Image (spheres, grey):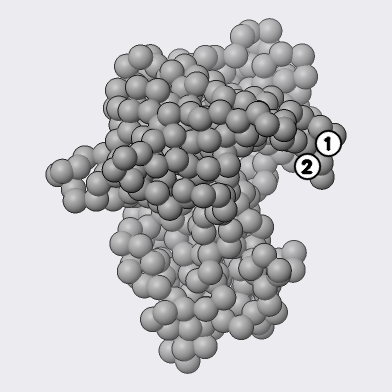
């Protein structure tokens, strides 16, 4: 954690004043950059709450006796308690409360789907707008210098290897080092953060914020070995032979799902992971200053309806797309992307094309993609997800002109995971674990997307936290 500083102890009140929430006040609006300006570059779209905005929002909290917002948080942050500290302007105290359960508030406050988690459970949301919990979490998370020095338990003289430095891996590493373990994180890339740096654009999550959290873990004592592909340079067994007592595997689920349609390999057709990695991590947006180019299309179509699809289409817009379309096989109502992502994309000029599914990519004279042929769809009966199943309309096709097409229909298990150890995998290639993340191998735990499939940052963090506790109990 950042360097500890002395904070003045809040003065004790001579008389106890009863808190009266300002529950009828409107929700404090996000502090966003104007859409017409922010879409010109990769600046953060949200500047975050000012102190006045944070206090106004904290004063809306009902301070419920049975706070459902906590149950909506996968890591069970004590939300009313940290909001109470904000009201008292004890921002360091608020951060300390969050750090008891989450080490990444500046990240989670920016990218977690609060609308379906903590804010989705807020009582105020039943009759109006919920508390802006994510904004308040980010507000204090962006003040790391106010945090108290974390308590580190006595050294247990046990070594743990963590494979992958995404949200699940670094959460597990942070929890373990605080419990007195010697922890080394092995990361295949040249920098830490995993999907936080390669998958989420700068305008949603600045790389400096992720680096700050990685640096804080280094200060705690976590060691990072970059350009280290466990499963290639060494296996789990070889690491155990070098003195490691346990391993946590958090390699993620970054293998793109194929569309399996003609023209998928044409120049100008990308998978979202490839496209976002080139721009986010390899600085393709700054070509030719960095030699990792990507096609900057004028007419871009993205297939998918989740947050990754939104990130890809909004990135294309910032790279100069005059027409940017997000095409989805269901309607806008069924899109799994967060409401905020969809709202921001449309404000930036992205067009939503519902009820279409790609069937072929067509090549132009020079061999590059020139159009995407789509099948028009209609909604039938609900499927296993509860959403109405898209069904093709016979003979209804349309060619959509494009010079860049991006597939963002999901990902599969990282195939690297099966090279690490001989633990049991399910039929989709994900690692099988019990409720504590324990695999079929006695000294190996796993968590995050390599166990659950693609999910949220906070769910991956929750898995890392659970596994750290189980590893501690087992090795201790």
Q: Which residue is drawn at 72% across and 31% down?
A: 393
Q: In which quarter of the image is residue 226?
A: bottom left
Q: How crowded is mark 1: few (under 14 residues within 10 Å), some or many (20 or more)?
A: few
Q: Is residue 165 above or below residue 350?
A: below
Q: Residues within 10 Å of mark 2 (few under 14, many from 20)?
A: few
Q: Can residue 323 be seen in this view?
A: yes
x and y, in percent, of residue 413 in the image: 58, 62
Q: How many marks?
A: 2
**What quarter of the picture does the C terminus occupy?**
bottom right
Q: Is mark 1 on a helix, strand or loop?
A: strand
Residue furthest left as drawn: 289
Using the image as rendered, state which of residue 87 and residue 427 is in the foreground. Answer: 427
Instruction: Please report contact status of discs 1 and 2: CB closer than 8 Å, yes or no.
Output: yes
Q: Which residue is drawn at 62% across and 34% down?
A: 375
Q: Closer to the camera: disc 1 or disc 2?
A: 1
Q: Is residue 465 visible?
A: no
Q: In this view, does 211 lie above or below 433?
A: above
User: Which residue is labeled 2 in the image?
Assistant: 385
Using the image as rendered, state which of residue 441 and residue 73 is in the foreground. Answer: 441
Is 376 left, or right, of 271 in this rendering?
right
Q: How far apart are marks 1 and 2 (CA)?
A: 7 Å
Q: Residue at x 72, y 19 (%)?
A: 124
Q: In this view, does 161 lie above or below 79?
A: below
User: Which residue is labeled 1 in the image?
Assistant: 382
Residue furthest bottom as drawn: 241
| Residue 315, disc | none
Q: Residue at x 33, y 28 (%)?
A: 298
């Amino acid at each position: 954690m950042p360097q500890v500083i002395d904070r003045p102890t809040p003065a004790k009140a001579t008389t106890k004043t009863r808190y009266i929430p300002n529950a009828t006040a409107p929700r404090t609006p996000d502090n966003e950059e104007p859409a017409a300006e922010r879409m010109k570059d990769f600046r953060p779209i949200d500047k975050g709450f000012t102190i006045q905005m944070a206090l106004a929002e904290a004063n809306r909290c009902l301070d419920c006796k049975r706070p459902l917002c906590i149950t909506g948080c996968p890591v069970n942050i004590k939300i009313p308690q940290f909001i109470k500290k904000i009201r008292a302007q004890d921002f360091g105290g608020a951060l300390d409360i969050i750090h008891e359960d989450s080490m990444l508030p500046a990240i989670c406050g920016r990218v977690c789907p609060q609308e379906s988690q903590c804010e989705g459970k807020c009582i105020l949301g039943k009759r109006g707008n919920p508390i802006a919990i994510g904004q308040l979490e980010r507000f204090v998370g962006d003040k790391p210098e106010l945090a108290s020095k974390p308590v580190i338990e006595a050294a247990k003289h046990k070594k743990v290897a963590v494979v992958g430095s995404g949200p699940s891996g670094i959460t597990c590493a942070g929890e373990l080092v605080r419990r007195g373990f010697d922890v080394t994180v092995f990361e295949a890339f040249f920098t830490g953060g995993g999907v936080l740096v390669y998958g989420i654009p700068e305008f949603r999550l600045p790389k400096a914020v992720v680096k700050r959290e990685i640096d804080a873990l280094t200060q705690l004592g976590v060691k990072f070995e970059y350009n280290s592909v466990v499963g290639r340079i060494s296996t789990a067994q070889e690491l155990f032979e070098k003195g490691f007592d346990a391993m946590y595997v958090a390699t993620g689920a970054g293998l793109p799902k194929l569309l399996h349609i003609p023209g998928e390999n044409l120049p100008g057709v990308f998978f979202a992971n490839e496209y976002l990695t080139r721009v986010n991590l390899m600085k393709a947006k700054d070509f030719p200053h960095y030699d990792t180019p990507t096609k900057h299309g004028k007419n871009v179509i993205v297939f998918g309806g989740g947050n990754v699809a939104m990130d890809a289409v909004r990135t294309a817009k910032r790279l100069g797309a005059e027409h940017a379309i997000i095409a989805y096989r269901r309607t806008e109502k069924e899109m799994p992307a967060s409401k905020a992502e969809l709202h921001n994309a449309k404000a930036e000029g992205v067009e939503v094309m519902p009820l279409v599914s790609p069937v072929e990519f067509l090549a132009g004279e020079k061999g590059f993609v020139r159009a995407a042929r789509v099948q028009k769809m209609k909604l039938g009966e609900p499927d296993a997800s509860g959403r109405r199943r898209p069904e093709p309309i016979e003979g209804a096709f349309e060619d959509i002109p494009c010079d860049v097409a991006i597939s963002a229909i999901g990902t599969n298990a990282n195939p690297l995971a099966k090279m690490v150890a001989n633990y049991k995998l399910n039929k989709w290639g994900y690692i099988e674990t019990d409720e504590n993340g324990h695999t079929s191998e006695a000294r190996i735990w796993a968590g995050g997307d390599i166990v659950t499939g693609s999910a949220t940052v906070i769910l991956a963090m929750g898995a890392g936290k659970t596994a750290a506790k189980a590893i501690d109990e087992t090795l201790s």
